[in-house]
Image (cartoon, rainbow, N blue to C red):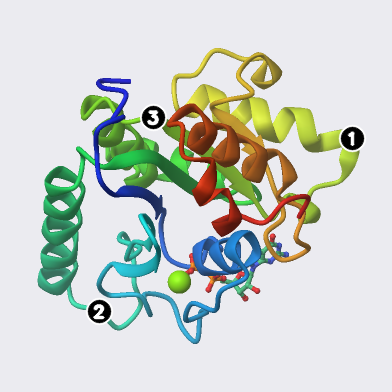
Amino acid sequence: MASPKKNASKYEIVFVGRSNVGKSTLIRSLTGKPVPIGRRPGVTRRPENLTSGDLIVTDMPGFGFMSGVKDRKQDIIKTKFVRYIEDHSDRIILAVLVLNGQSFAEIVDRWSGRGEIPVEVEMYQFLQELELDVVVAVNKIDKTKDKNRDSVMDGVAERLDILPPWKQWPDKLIPISAKKGDVKALSGLIRSRIHELGRDDLLGCIRLGV
Ligand SMILES: Nc1nc2c(ncn2[C@@H]2O[C@H](COP(=O)(O)OP(=O)(O)O)[C@@H](O)[C@H]2O)c(=O)[nH]1
Ligand SMILES: [Mg+2]
């Protein structure tokens, strides 16, 4: 991480990822606060800030393919995304990249096969380049059979250039099910980051034991 951000007056946690991976569901599960949930892909067009005192939780617009949204409009959304993250990097204590564990590998391989950089890989690299603390939340893990879980998680790791086995990176790769409220490891990580800032007064914003 670039700086400990101990002197910031406000702290921000951003949730990024393509449309429909479960960002809004996850934020609701972690904070208990309602955020607009997927009426259709791309519903979140601008960063939605949920503010609790000095902690800001942000639901970023998903970029990448959005049905019914023109290419030019998608470029504008992407430019705004990049600018928002850059402008707020001083106060961003954690970036949570949310992926759909069920479809990630297949989508990445399809894009790579066409010689394109998959959106999520691009987002991950961008966040790393800004030296933000990034954690990858591999969502919808309830759809994966227990016996396949390790191979799904290792498949995600490989495609993000994180050395498998995934279990050696508990601060980087976390399987979750936002819908079922199975997000305990992620909420624990967020809470420990807040604790490290010496701001236990903000812990109340993130639910315990969900
Ligand atoms: N099976 C399953 N479905 C989920 C999970 N999280 C979200 N969803 C569903 O995925 C869809 C998109 O969720 P949403 O939170 O709107 O995604 P967003 O576009 O990234 O904000 C909704 O139908 C959710 O109910 C999960 O952990 N498991
Ligand atoms: Mg959303």
SS assignment at label 2:
loop
Give the residue pinned by disc 3: 133
Q: Quadrant of the N terminus?
A: top left
Q: Nearer the viewer, residue 45 or 56?
A: 56
Residue at point 30% right, 42% down? 92
Image quarter where ligand 2 lies: bottom left
The correct choice, above or below, for 190 with respect to 2 in the image is below
Q: Please tell me in which quadrant of the rendered image residue 177 appears.
A: bottom right
Q: Residues within 10 Å of mark 1 (few under 14, many from 20)?
A: few
Q: State which tag comes first along the sequence, 1 or 2.
A: 2
The mark found on residue 85 in the picture is none
The mark found on residue 69 in the picture is 2
Q: State which tag comes first along the sequence, 2 or 3.
A: 2
Give the residue pinned by disc 1: 147
**Do the numbered discs 3 and 1 sit on residues whose CB atoms are within 8 Å?**
no
Q: Residues within 10 Å of mark 2 (few under 14, many from 20)?
A: few
SS assignment at label 1:
helix
